[in-house]
Image: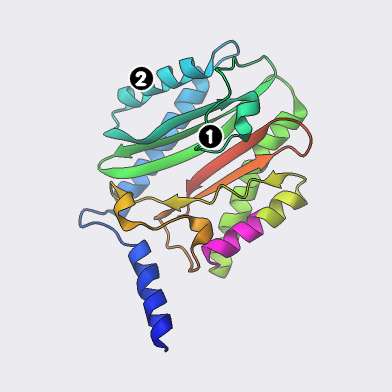
Amino acid sequence: MSEAMNQQDAINASKQAVGDGFSVASMRYASDMTWKAVEAVAREIRPGMRESEAVARCKEVLAELGMDRIWHPILIRFGENTLKTFKQASTVDPQLGEDDIFFVDLGAVWDRHEGDAGATFVTGDDAEMRACADAAKVVFDEVAHHWRTTGAGGKDLYRYAAQRAEAHGWRLNVDIKGHRISDFPHAIYKAGNLGDFEACPSAGLWILEIQLAHPTRPFGSFYEDLLA
């Protein structure tokens, strides 16, 4: 094996490092609790509510569930803001409509381990909004299956995600590329994006993010979960 390959293997290993307190069971618990929070918050969101009100209620729900802390800002997007990336600010403070779409993206620490989960929900009977919300989960599942069955690296997973999104009639937001999580804080490992990671991501350490856009209408959908 060449020296260059040895160096790349070392880099890849460093990007999948964990702390002394890391526990697979705790990672699963953090994931389960974050999903519990996502679902609880989604049940609280109703037409007429503003994004800022949903975020405020979300903070209360997380506290009620006993999280250690928030590790990334709460992200709740209504309507056209579902097309925004994580780092883009919402446009104004929209009010959720009777026939509308929204997503919840939460990153919280439980038992000193990071959870990260997100999903899209709809109000009313707009068939295209419901199809878009469902498609984000469908594409996620297809990419996760591809990872499990082929051992594909992160870059290949996102190329496959773009193909699957297009096959279903949606556009993948290629600026959303997934990321590491771990025992808190994962940021010390400087792992970068999953979509830029050449090697096959290890189970229980990487979040696969899928964000779709409707081809003609101003809304999208989002789904993320742990590759496990």
Which residue is at 55% across, 35% downward?
119
For label 2, the crowd category at 10 Å Cα-Cα, with few meaning under 14, some 14 to 19 and many 20 or more, is: few
* Quarter occupied by residue 159: bottom right
Q: Which mark is residue 88?
A: 1
Q: Amino acid at mark 2?
A: Glu
The residue closer to the viewer here, 67 or 186, is 186
Q: Is residue 62 visible?
A: yes
Q: Which residue is mark 2?
A: 60
Q: Position of residue 27 (x, y in %)?
A: 34, 48
Q: Which residues are the magenta region?
A: 152-161
* Quarter occupied by residue 10: bottom left
Which of the two discs, 1 and 2, labels the residue nearer the N terminus? 2
Q: Amino acid at mark 1?
A: Gln
Toward the left, the furthest residue is: 20
168 versus 217 height, above or below: below
Q: Main secondary structure of the magenta part?
A: helix
Distance Cα–Cα, label 1 vs label 2: 24 Å
Q: Is residue 122 visible?
A: no
Which residue is at 56% across, 47% downward?
176
Q: Position of residue 82 (x, y in %)?
A: 61, 31
Q: Position of residue 144 (x, y in %)?
A: 56, 56
Q: Nearer the viewer, mark 1 or mark 2?
A: 1
Q: Position of residue 87 (x, y in %)?
A: 49, 37
Toward the top, the furthest residue is: 48
